[in-house]
Amino acid sequence: MLRWQGRRLVLVTGLVVEFPLALVELARGAGYSVTASLPDALAAGDVAGVLVAIAVSAAVLVVVCAVAAVGWAGGIHLLTGTAAPGRSVEVKDAYRHGLSRLPLLGAWTLGVVMLLVAGLAAFVVPGLYVLFALSLFSFPVLFEPGVDPLRRSFALTHARGAGVFARLGVLAAVAVAFESALSLFFAGVSRALLGRTGWGTGGHGLSDGVVDAVHTAVGAPVWALLVAGLTVTYAELRARQPENTSHAAHPRPDTARS
């Protein structure tokens, strides 16, 4: 199934997750970077400016998490859902499913992102641990209603800790390698078109923002890879756990087709 749904998965998960991030890059290049305005407002003692920057940052975070939740749930449904007899799940079906799961999954996504940011701010290592321990939180939200998704993800990732860590490590390594290759490529594009790589800067202008936005959008296959890898990992971990009364009534993702 993954072989046939690969392109649709990139459309549903990859581009949807990357789209708001690309817009943020475009806005940053155009001079509307919230992350740059907040330190300036703090240094100037501008209370109103600080409040506005915080409010805009929070709004951007909520929108990004909401759109990402739609794409993530849609991508999982594309791999595990069922459609009418004789046809596979279509892109429009995946989007509808993602939108229907937005209220619940969006809220949990926002909470997990805030935990991750706090962990990364605490000397990075705690953030990496949070990323590992909560990497499967979305699946209990979608497939195990009534279960605390944070505790469930923690239990699943630690049940076979070394094996799960190795698999997620491979996924992370592939994602990092892909993104590094893209960064080098677009640094060359920026150098050829604009005369600079753009590295280590806060953005020189709209042209840099356009290059960064395209760079972000082209990274969509990474998210498709992650949703596929994590879906298979969740299904295998859950299949190896004995059923109990709290989980027996909840549906399992059908990954046999992948």
Image (tube, rainbow, N blue to C red):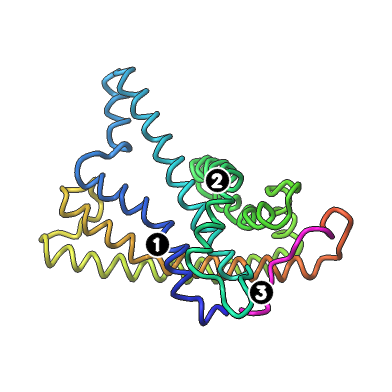
Q: How many marks?
A: 3
Which residue is at 37% across, 50% downward? 20
**In which quadrant is the C terminus drawn?**
bottom right
- Which amino acid, by three-letter code, is at mark 3? Thr
Which residue is at 58% across, 71% downward? 79
Residue 72 against residue 204 in the figure, above or below: below
Q: Which residues are magenta?
A: 248-258
Identify the mark nearer the N-term, 1 or 2. Answer: 1
Seen in the image, is 211 located left or right of residue 150? Answer: left
Q: Which mark is residue 106?
A: 2
**Residue under circle 3?**
255
Q: Is residue 254 magenta?
A: yes
Residue 34 on image: x %, y %: 31, 36
**Residue under circle 1?**
15
Q: Residues under labels 1 and 2: Cα distance? A: 17 Å
- Which amino acid, by three-letter code, is at mark 1? Leu
Looking at the image, which is closer to me, 28 or 100? 100
Residue 74 on image: x %, y %: 53, 61
**In which quadrant is the N terminus drawn?**
bottom right
- Cβ–Cβ below 8 Å for labels 3 and 1? no
- Which amino acid, by three-letter code, is at mark 2? Gly
